[in-house]
């Protein structure tokens, strides 16, 4: 359900070209883009404990500004349970 982008390559790629079956957590991140995406995503900007700082839905070809207080970004494609992804993300961030 949750993939963690831990390498530079995985962070650059994000969900581009993914099948949309899993959410993606980007640690040490406070902004994203949806260039080259083919579907909208729900985006959760998370604090150190996995709490939601801001939530937005982004359509393809958008760029966000950095979000103050966010230390990670969770990208959730349509059809993926956002609540489950948020719980899993909080556990990952708690271990860092």
Image (spheres, rainbow, N blue to C red):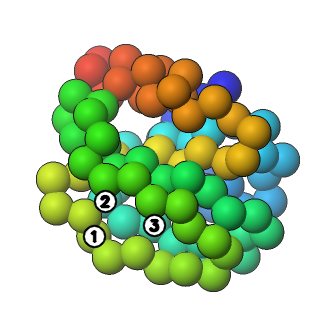
Picture residue at 75% right of the left edge, 39% below the top: 79
Q: Looking at the picture, how far across and down is residue 11, in whole percent?
A: 52, 55
Would residue 49 appear left or right of 73 to someone viewing this image?
left
How far apart are labels 2 and 3 at the CA level? 7 Å
Q: Judge whether 85 appears above or below 37 on screen.
A: above
Quadrant position of residue 22: top right
The residue labelled by disc 1 is: 66
Looking at this view, name the residue that lies furthest to the right.
19
| Mark 3 Cα-neighbour bin, 10 Å: few <14, some 14–19, many ≥20 | many
Residue on which disc 2 sits: 30
Residue under label 3: 32
Secondary structure found at label 1: loop
- Residues at discs 2 and 1 in contact (Cβ within 8 Å): yes
At x 69%, y 35%, the residue is 80
Q: Do we see residue 8 in this rendering?
A: no
Residue 32 coordinates in the image, percent (x, y):
45, 67
Q: Nearer the viewer, residue 6 or 46?
A: 46
Q: How crowded is mark 2: few (under 14 residues within 10 Å), some or many (20 or more)?
A: many
| Rendering coords of residue 48 (x, y %) | 20, 35
Q: Does the CB distance between marks 2 and 3 fall below 8 Å? A: no
Single out the residue that lies furthest toward the left: 69
Quadrant (top left/top right/bottom left/bottom right) for the C terminus: top left
Task: State how far apart marks 2 and 1 are (Cα).
Answer: 5 Å
Q: Residue at x 30, y 41 (%)?
A: 52
């Amino acid at each position: 359900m949750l993939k963690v982008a831990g390498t530079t390559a995985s962070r650059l790629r994000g969900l581009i070209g993914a099948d949309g079956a899993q959410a993606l957590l980007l640690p040490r991140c406070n902004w994203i883009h949806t260039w080259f995406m083919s579907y909208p995503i729900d985006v959760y900007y998370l604090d150190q404990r996995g709490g939601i700082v801001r939530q937005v839905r982004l359509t393809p070809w958008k760029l966000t500004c950095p979000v103050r207080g966010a230390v990670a970004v969770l990208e959730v494609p349509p059809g993926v349970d956002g609540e489950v992804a948020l719980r899993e993300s909080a556990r990952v961030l708690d271990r860092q």
